[in-house]
């Protein structure tokens, strides 16, 4: 495969990423049309319900699309959804050849787009930049194949693994630049989840607050849906997350154990209440919660604590990725809390492993030691 082919597909992937966090439950898709060695049209899917990337690129190319080659980051659709099939548009426009990076596992597509294009006489090739294309849309791929969102566990801790002092003080372990990174994460995430303990201890608002020099600020800020897992309705109505003036939507994920009057009071404030099954300990069933989140069309979920919630998610093998800020500070204290609670794993063979580590120093200014930002995929042991 020539370097030009790679460059065109990487451009398609670059275009697709411009809509990060904006297309759920659809995937991010970019498309580039090339004729006689020149790009004559390009586009990307900007949001669910908007024209697909292929259509945007065809509109940009106009008549130049006839006899041209399209590079698209995902297999073109061949079905009617909110928009007509892209395959029909490609055929009608006279596209001669299509390169797509990776197949779409959606049962309504899954090879059908490839087959329809080939049957119309269009040369079709796939697999170019497949790994990059999968990584770009892995939240979509998980959601479409399992019905659950892609789950990222995020926490900040000291170098010795503490998230607060023995007296409960936790603001701030990470530096200002790291905290701004959290807001950037929220800006491209569908929903954020915290437990009742975190809300009562920290009283967060869980909104997105970006400074003017960050991508998406200040014109395209997105507030993820705030989900509070509170099985017994312990979080008071006065909590910031329940303030009707907050931008975005708040959800209480609870069980039948929560008092009915508490649930009704929250509903009158505009909080959406999900009454879900309880697990054996009486807590919100996490598989049921993730299934409900997925059913609502949310493909990405950022879990920001607390320790018991994270421990339960890891124990149930429901976390896909971690994002950890490690601050250059020692807190100490045998009773100071760590980021992941619960019973833990009895043996190292059962422990969660990490792969594909990415490390990045994050400093607020040159005079202070940076935090270390670590991202990694979660690998669960077999069995």
Image: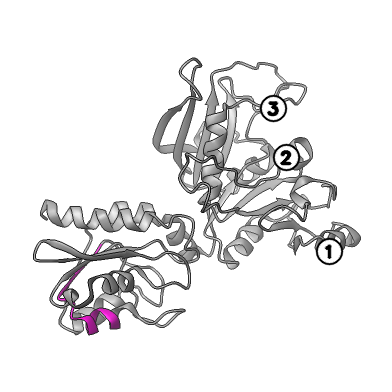
Question: Height in image: 365 above or below 74?
Answer: above
Select label 2 or label 1 by which is in front: 1
Label 2 and label 3: CA atoms lie apart by: 11 Å
Q: Residues within 10 Å of mark 3 (few under 14, many from 20)?
A: some
Image position, residue 161 (x, y; %): 59, 24
The residue identified by callout 1 is: 268
Q: Locate the N terminus by quadrant.
A: bottom left
The span picked out in magenta is: 88-100
Residue 198 magenta-drawn? Answer: no
Left or right of 368? Residue 335 is right
Q: Residues within 10 Å of mark 1 (few under 14, many from 20)?
A: few
The residue identified by callout 2 is: 198
User: Tag 1 or tag 3, which sits nearer the N-term?
Assistant: 3
SS of the residue at dot 2? Answer: helix
Determine the image quadrant of residue 117.
bottom left
Residue depicted at 30% across the width and 71% down the height: 54
SS of the residue at dot 1? Answer: helix
Label 2 and label 1: CA atoms lie apart by: 23 Å
């Amino acid at each position: 495969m020539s370097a030009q082919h790679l460059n065109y597909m990487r451009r398609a992937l670059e275009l697709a990423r411009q809509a990060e966090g904006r297309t759920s439950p659809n995937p991010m898709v970019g498309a580039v049309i090339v004729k006689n060695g020149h790009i004559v049209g390009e586009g990307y899917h900007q949001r669910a319900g908007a024209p697909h990337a292929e259509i945007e690129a065809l509109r940009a190319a106009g008549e130049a699309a006839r006899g041209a080659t399209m590079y698209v980051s995902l297999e073109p659709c061949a079905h009617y959804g909110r928009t007509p099939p892209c395959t029909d548009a490609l055929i009608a426009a006279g596209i001669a050849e299509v390169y797509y990076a990776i197949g779409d596992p959606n049962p309504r597509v899954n090879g059908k787009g490839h087959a329809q294009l080939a049957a119309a006489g269009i040369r079709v090739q796939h697999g170019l930049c497949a790994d990059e294309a999968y990584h770009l849309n892995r939240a979509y791929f998980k959601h479409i194949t399992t019905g659950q969102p892609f789950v990222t566990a995020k926490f900040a801790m000291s170098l010795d693994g503490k998230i607060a002092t023995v007296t409960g003080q936790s603001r701030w372990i990470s530096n200002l630049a790291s905290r701004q990174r959290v807001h950037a994460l929220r800006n491209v995430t569908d929903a954020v989840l915290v437990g009742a303990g975190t809300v009562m201890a920290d009283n967060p608002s869980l909104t997105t607050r970006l400074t003017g020099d960050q991508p998406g600020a200040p014109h395209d800020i997105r507030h993820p849906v705030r989900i509070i897992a509170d099985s017994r309705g312990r979080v008071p109505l006065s909590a910031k997350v329940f303030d009707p003036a907050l931008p975005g939507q708040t959800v209480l994920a609870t069980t039948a154990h929560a008092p009915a009057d508490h649930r009704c009071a929250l509903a009158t404030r505009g909080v959406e209440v999900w009454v879900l099954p309880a697990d054996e300990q009486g807590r919100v069933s996490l598989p049921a919660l993730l299934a409900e989140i997925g059913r609502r069309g949310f493909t990405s979920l950022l879990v920001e604590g607390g320790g018991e919630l994270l421990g339960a998610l890891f124990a149930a093998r429901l976390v896909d990725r971690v994002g950890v800020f490690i601050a250059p500070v020692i807190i100490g204290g045998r009773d100071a809390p760590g980021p992941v609670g619960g019973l833990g794993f009895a043996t190292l063979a059962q422990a969660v492993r990490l792969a594909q580590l990415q490390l990045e120093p994050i400093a607020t200014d040159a005079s202070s030691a940076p935090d270390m930002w670590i991202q990694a995929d979660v690998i669960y042991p077999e069995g």
